[in-house]
Amino acid sequence: MTDIAIIGGGPAGLTAALYAARGGVSVRLLEELFPGGQIVKTHCIENYPGISDGPDGYALAARFEEHAGKAGVAPEYAGVTALSLTDDKKEITLATGETFEAKAVILCMGASPRSLGVPGERELTTHGVSYCATCDGAFFRGKIATVIGGGDTAISDALYLSKLCSKVYVVHRRDELRASAVLANAARKTENIEFVWNSVPEAFLGEDKLTAIRLKNVKTGEVSDLVTDGAFVAVGIVPKTDLVKDQLTLASNGSIETNERMETSVKGVFAAGDIRNTPLRQVVTACADGAIAATYAIEAVRL
Ligand code: NAP
């Protein structure tokens, strides 16, 4: 019987692993792809205290992984296919076919990018439509890129793309950005970034590859086609709760409800980071969640 199973190896999961291992309990950390979660999509993290040189997400994730490893936990690269979570018993099933039990579980599966759900989006994904500027931006070197959204992800993506692309449009449904002031100001000062305000995509156009985005101005109703080589959709995130949504209490936005100890509605089950109902989604808050969850999971295991 494992003491604590941690599902997901982003900042929350890797920090939970560090704290749990240092607490002297047995830990298994399951990650399906690579360490870091959403932060690997970030080209420059400038607001993690104590590290002002702005590492990229991969580099910071590697440091988190190394730190957890030094404490004695290495991520196991295995997808979790099923979770059975009750007050009395917690069972974790892996893609390898293995099922094991843990006394406590910390859910750190994070979130995935939200899609717009408009015609052409699904068909042209990987053919000009992308959800990750740092992954796919290089394909549009010297070309025109368009970012959709007005939050931190959209504006950091636009700033990243502005260094690669000849022109970057930012299409936002309002005329005011949601992104933090420091990012918004930097984007406004960048010559090759142009804002297209009060507009939403109605369709992504093109046969084999994206050629334009059909936009509707939500104030005037006017419809126009914006010629672009790439489209980067950054309209928010959806918590990855598929495996647990029928077993735990969720908030109206689909994230997992927790208390300040990161406890969910099931005894011995904790949630940390972007998957939980949190007012702030930053690396620093995900790490804090992971540390708190591990602390109270250790307490639960020892009771
Ligand atoms: P977000 O903050 O939820 O912003 C989503 C943006 O997309 C908003 O501007 C929203 O418009 C727009 N939007 C939503 N649905 C739309 C739709 N159907 N059509 C058109 N536009 C739509 O999401 P995010 O930028 O991915 O950020 C997620 C979390 O990660 C946030 O907490 C953010 O602070 C954090 N984050 C932080 C950093 C950083 O600190 N450097 C970097 C990346 C992400 P409205 O503004 O009108 O709602």
Image (tube, rainbow, N blue to C red):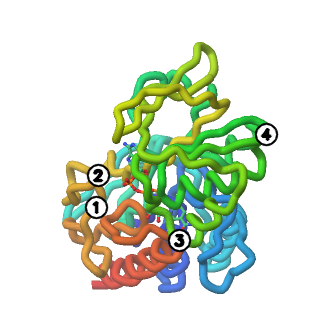
Mark-to-mark CA distance, 1 and 4:
39 Å
Residue 18 in picture, x, y percent from top left: 55, 77
Please name which of the two marks, 1 or 4, marks the residue nearer to the observer. 4
Q: Is residue 157 above or below residue 146?
A: below
Q: Say left or right for 79 vs 56.
A: left
Query: Which element carries disc 3, helix, strand or loop?
Result: helix
User: Residue extending furthest top?
Assistant: 207
Q: Say if residue 126 shows up in the picture.
A: no
Task: Identify the residue position indicated by label 4 in the image.
Answer: 141
Task: Identify the residue position indicated by label 1 in the image.
Answer: 256
Task: Identify the residue position indicated by label 2 in the image.
Answer: 244
Q: For the residue carrying disc 3, how many other residues have a C-alpha within 10 Å: few (<14), some (14-19), or many (20+)?
A: few
Please name which of the two marks, 4 or 3, marks the residue nearer to the observer. 3
Task: Identify the residue position indicated by label 3 in the image.
Answer: 181
User: What amino acid type should be assigned to the residue bearing mark 3?
Assistant: Ala
Residue closer to the observer: 185 or 265: 185
Q: Is mark 3 within 8 Å of ligand 1?
A: no
